[in-house]
Amino acid sequence: MAVDNGDAAMAVAVTGTRTVAPAKTKVTLATFDLPYITFYYNQKLLLYRLPQGAADFQDVTARMADALGDALAYFYPLAGRIRPSALPIHNRAMARSVRVGLTLPASAEAHEKTDPNGPKKPLVARVFSFPEPVVARIKAAANAALPPGAKPFSAFQSLGAHIWRSVSRARELGPADITVFAVFADCRARLDPPVPATYFGNLIQAVFTGVPAGMLLGGPPELAAGMLQKAIGEHDAAAVTRRLDEYEAAPKLFHYSDAGPNCVAVGSSPRFRVYDVDFGFGRPERVRSGGNNKFDGMVYLYPGRGGDSGGIDVELALQPEPMQRLEKDEEFLQVAAA
C-alpha cells in the first residue's frame, strides 16, 4: 500500500479562478435533496499534465470554460459532465412528489456556526493506495471464516471494515465508546419501482451502523464486514420510504456531526471512472476532493490510478494525532506486505 502525502515538487500554484454562471437559477428539489442542502457542493480537483506545458494553459482553460458554459446553459447541475452519454432525467417527482418547507440559513458557512457540537476540528488528509492484490488479500481475510453457503463480503465491505477498525484504533477509543460507520447509498435501484440510472438528482441516503469500539476491535474482521453487509442489505425500498416519511414529518437541516459519534463516513465510489475524464489532453494525473465537505472520518474512494483494475485509492480526513498514529499502524499498513 502506498501513501500519498503530497510533494513539494508537485505543489500546485493557483494562478487564477473563473466562475461560470448558470443560465438557470431555479431547480425544483425533492425530499432526497433537502437533507444535504446545507452541505457544500461536491468539490473534486482533477490535475492534468498538459502536452505543451504552460504554453497550452490559456487555450485549455478557455476551452474548458466554454464547454462548461454550454453544459450549464442546458442544466446547471451538469457541471463537470461536459459530454453526457445519455440525456439526464430532471423530473424530481419521479423519485418523490411530496414537498416540505424549510427555512434556509444565509449560507452554508452560517449554518456551520449553529452546530451544537461546535466548529469543525483541524484536519489533515491523506491518500492511501490499495493495489488490486492488496484489496484481494483484505477481501480474502474477511471471507476466510465464513461458513459454507454464506453470502461473501464484497471488496467494499471488506475494505470498509479494515478502514473502520484501523481508524477506531488510531482514535484510541475506549471499549464502551460507540463508533459509527456511514455509507452514502444510491437509492435509484432500491426504490419500488426503481428509478432509471439517468435520473439526475441527489437520490442518496446515508446508511448507518454502530457498535462499541471494544466489540469492533476485539472481534475478527468478518464481524465489521458483516455489520456493513447487513446494514446495506436491509436498506431496501421500505427502509428508504420510512426514512423519507420521518424526514418529511420533521424536516431539519443537518450538520456534519449528525453522521454520528466517532464516525467513519464513505462517499464516492471506485465505480466512478474519474480517471476517464478527458477534455482532449489526456487523463488526469491525480484526482482529489476539495476541503469543503471534509470532516473528521470522511472517506472518499476512487479507482486506482494508472489503470489499476480493482485497485482503490482511499482519501481520508482525520484529526492530526489520530492520523499520525494511523500512518504508523503496522496492522493497517502491513496488508501491503507480500
Image: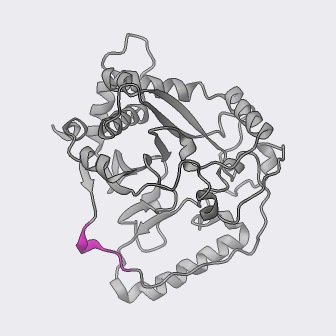
**3, 249: nearer the viewer:** 249
Residue lying at 54% horizontally and 46% vertically, measured from the top left: 257
Q: Position of residue 230 (x, y in %)?
A: 52, 23
**336, 37: nearer the viewer:** 37
In the rendered structure, does residue 10 fall within the stretch colored magenta?
A: yes
Q: Position of residue 263 (x, y in %)?
A: 46, 40
Q: Position of residue 42 (x, y in %)?
A: 55, 59
Residue 129 as seen in the image, left or right of residue 330: right
Residue lying at 69% horizontally and 43% vertically, measured from the top left: 196
Q: What is the magenta range?
A: 7-13
- Up the image or down, 156 lies above or below 77; here it is above
**Extreme residue toward the left, this view:** 338
How many marks the image carries: the answer is 0
The quarter holding residue 104 reads bottom right
- Up the image or down, 325 lies above or below 213; here it is below
Residue 56 as seen in the image, left or right of residue 252: left
Quadrant (top left, top right, bottom left, bottom right) of the C terminus = top left
In the rendered structure, does residue 307 fall within the stretch colored magenta?
A: no
Q: Position of residue 111 (x, y in %)?
A: 64, 58
The quarter holding residue 169 reads top left
Residue 132 as seen in the image, left or right of residue 114: left
